[in-house]
Amino acid sequence: MKKIELLAPAGNLAKMATAFLYGADAVYLGIPDFSLRVRINDFDLKSLREAVAYAHKKQKKVYVTVNIFAHNKHLKKLPTYLKILKNLKADALIISDPGILNLTKKYCPRIPIHLSTQANCTNSEAVKFWAKQGVERIILGREVTLTEIKEIKKIVPKIELEYFVHGAMCMAYSGRCFLSKELVDRSANLGDCAQPCRWPYEVTIKAEKRADVFELVEENHGAYLLNSKDLCLVKHLPELIKAGVTSFKIEGRAKSIYYLATIVGIYKAALLETQKVGSGANTNKKSALSKKLNYFSQELKTKIINRGYTSGFLLNDKAAQNTTDSHNKVAWEFCGQVLASAAGLVLVKVHNTILGGSIIEIISPNYDIIRLKLNRLWDYKSQAEIKEAHGGGGGQMIIFELEAKIPAGSVLRRKLL
């Protein structure tokens, strides 16, 4: 059976550790200078070294993003950075710019090169071209359909194919958006997008001699005209595996620990179930798998904030927009993370309000869920019984009773009243 990889985002060391705990086989990350994440990105050279060492100790992989569209000013700093990555033994570099690719082959000849989705590779001839340049894996453009994935794999069978299966969608082709640069002078293609596609707008029409002109005006009570729904392909994992995808990528380096735990946990469990059933399974097994994937899909809809979900372009459909809201509200909220568990007690760092009497769910690796009512809780510092606890600052620590042993790093969510 071919090796299937679950690839998760990592915006800092804590997020990376969470991704690995919940089943990611590899993470992608990068420092702000050369990565498409300038803001909400805590990595520097020191933490990058720590990340690679931590991952390799756990027999996991780190792919470093060097995927900006570079200008000459970036190229001056790049050789020094590439030499550092060579010494760090990064498992692959994710690249979109041909100039950066040339320099990578010169300074890091033994590090595998993955072609970024920013390069919008969408056909078999382009895949052949990049393979000749030394690229080992193609991160296909989100615009590629399931039928096209099958065709590409058949024509270029030796190339590895990676595909985004979950996360935010860009309203521009393969993320090549110029709105942010135009409106607030922050370039999306240098990792500094202000996400104007998520703003509400009011549309006005100006009649002119030659044609009507539509004018978009940002307005607090307007519609979300450019706001794409989020990508969710958890139901389509069997078809993607059969089509030849071997790396399943989750978007979201700027997202929270709770987001990572939930999404990575669900997709890991879904991939394991899919592989367990296999392509030659009988009707009963396929039906059972379908029910499990439907369950995971429902969890994604109801347990974590989203913009509504779309299958994107996979099924040759138009990617759907959410024009009424910036995001959909859900009835659950991230509230804490387990620090330790022993002797029938659980120690938790509080992130958001936890109330006595609350219904909570503890999400363990493999998306094992324990639901319970918090009848009693204690403040860790004072050992006093309390009725509520709050996050913020350093984060209050609390204790509650639970016989099951919970892995450190597991996250908690609270059902909102």
Image (cartoon, helix red, strand yellow):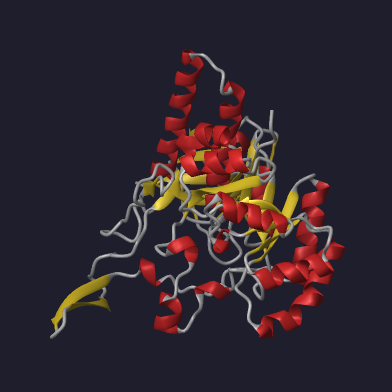
Q: Which residue lies furthest to the right in this view?
A: 87
Could you tell me residue 4's position as x and y percent? 66, 37
Q: Residue at x 61, y 53 (%)?
A: 127
Pick the front one: 75 or 193? 75
**Residue 364 found in image quarter:** top right
Q: Residue at x 50, y 73 (%)?
A: 188
Is residue 338 in sight in this rendering?
A: no
Placement of the N terminus among the 4 image quadrants:
top right
Work out whether 102 lies above or below 208.
above
With 160 as the anchor, is 148 left or right in this view?
left
**Residue 229 found in image quarter:** bottom left
Is residue 83 in sight in this rendering?
A: yes
Could you tell me residue 344's position as x and y percent? 65, 33
Q: Which residue is drawn at 61% across and 60% down?
A: 116
Pick the front one: 24 or 417? 24
Q: Which residue is drawn at 66% across and 76% down?
A: 33
Could you tell me residue 417's position as x and y percent? 34, 46
**Residue 299 found in image quarter:** top left
Pick the front one: 219 or 3? 3
Pick the front one: 141 or 369? 141
Could you tell me residue 334's position as x and y percent? 49, 51
Work out whether 126 lies above or below 83.
above
Numbered disc total:
0
Work out whether 334 lies above or below 364.
below
